[in-house]
Amino acid sequence: MKTQFQAKIEEITASAIPMHMPGHKRNTALLGDDLPYSVDLTEIDGADDLHDPEEGGIIGSLCERFASLYGARSAHPLVNGSTCGILAGIRTLTKPNDSVIVARNCHKSVWHAIEICRLNPTCILPPITPEHGICGAITAEAVEDAFVLSGGATCVILTSPTYEGVISDIDAIAEVCKKYNAALFVDAAHGAHLGFSKHFPDFPRGADIAVTSLHKTLPALTQTALGLVFNDKYSSAYARNLGIFETSSPSYILMNSIAKCADILSDCREMFDNYRAMLDDFYASTKPQMLSLIKTDDIGKISISTRNTTFTGSSIADALRNRFRIEPEMVHSDYLLCMTSICDTSENLFALSRAIMELDGEAECSEGRTYPSFITELPPVEIPLTDAVWLDLPDGGEVSNAYVWVYPPGVPLLLPGERVTEEIKNHLEMLKNSGISPKIIKTS
Ligand SMILES: Cc1ncc(COP(=O)(O)O)c(C=O)c1O
């Protein structure tokens, strides 16, 4: 069904000769109609302006709808992914040279924000869960300890939920932030579906600013996301910073997809009930003996652990791909992640269940084959990140001249300026041996 947003676009485009961008001029007679030329527009009269939305305009109304859907003071539809919302959010909440507290398992976009905003991070290392070796939640106590270490941090930055669906107690952490008069930024890129039904936890509304990727867990086109401001005092600064980091030519195709997503969320109870029922059936019929399912706060994230078996994350991903035509979202050394959503079908989940059970029957015990998915000790910082990225540090030296991550998830194992510890060397070796190639992004 068409959105009101699309109806308005069609109304505008029907009545005007396009003497404006985009250059395709909606000429489907010439170009064919295999791409959505007819609703691809620019900010002409009546089409509103993403960077200065009008009250009652098509984008202004969309902002209001999302603020109300997520219980935020203001909402910003984003067309450059969560990435631009994260860069803008961290710049909004900090000043150059500020000390900030950062969960070390944050996405590269957070580290890029720290680099370009010239911040001094005090890192919190998330605990590694003993059973499956994934990053656990950041506790309020860990944040409190970091405040003591940091000496006057002005902002706390963390990811909740994580890729795998681990949720930190944001309300408790927000209390600690208040005590130290610091702001709280939450990267909730993987949590756009939270807070809409009793089957899933709440969205992290305790943040001052949070960002979420609609395209990751909801029906919305790639690159669509939301910046959500929960503390009004940051609203105008956040809008200004989005103007710095987000394109000045926002796609109406993407914004229309965001509008469609708002329509879906406005009446989504039955979809979430059906989704829950499908997941319940999946879990009831998927009880592997050798492989195991990693349980987190989000039952929609299905992570399969290959620990203590002859499979690795990569080998089971290959089997899913080649034998069952199932493409997983993320592969790690000893687990992989399949993402589900309200748009999945019971047939798809049944196929995944059958594949897991068949592979489980083939898995053999390999006691002791366990790898942590992340570092367990913070590498010493030899040169601050913001300085290290400008230095011509040698390759293969004791101090890193690169960001090193596996993508996905794009969480740096090593940052520029950190000591290349034995743990890091072993971890990188282990990744290579388990068929995973870390990406090395040199900064000098
Ligand atoms: C935790 C996390 N934050 C932020 C991002 C960036 O999101 P986007 O791709 O929407 O820019 C990602 C992308 O994978 C992510 O995993």
Image (tube, rainbow, N blue to C red):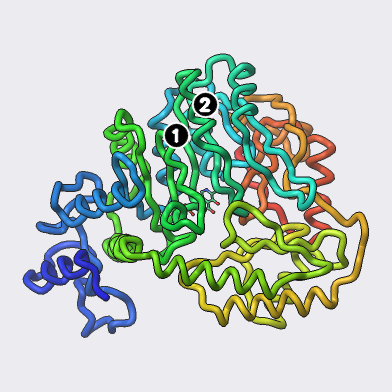
Q: Secondary structure at mark 1?
A: helix
195 relative to 395, above or below? below
Give the percent coordinates (x, y) of residue 281. Answer: 61, 74
Q: Residue at x 67, y 76 (%)?
A: 353
Indicate the quadrant containing the C terminus: top left, top right, bottom left or bottom right.
Answer: top right
Circles 2, 1 touching at the beta carbon (< 8 Å): yes
Question: Does mark 1's beta carbon lie closer than 8 Å to ligand 1?
Answer: no
Q: In the picture, residue 140 is in which quadrant?
A: top right
Residue wearing tag 2: 119
Q: Residue furthest left?
A: 15
Give the percent coordinates (x, y) of residue 12. Answer: 11, 67
146 relative to 81, above or below? above
**Left or right of 322 on screen, residue 245:** left
Q: Residue at x 47, y 56 (%)?
A: 198
Amino acid type, residue under disc 2 in the picture? Leu
Dot 1: within a 10 Å radius of its alpha carbon, few (fewer than 14), some, or many (20 or more) residues?
A: many
Point out the tag, 2 or 1, that comes first from the N-terminus: 1
Give the percent coordinates (x, y) of residue 333. Answer: 77, 57
Q: Number of callouts in the render?
A: 2
**Left or right of 364 on screen, residue 79:** left
Q: What label does residue 90 carry, if any?
A: 1
Dot 2: within a 10 Å radius of its alpha carbon, few (fewer than 14), some, or many (20 or more) residues?
A: many
Q: In the picture, residue 245 is in which quadrant?
A: top left
Amino acid type, residue under disc 1 in the picture? Ile
251 relative to 170, above or below? below
Q: Residue at x 73, y 60 (%)?
A: 335
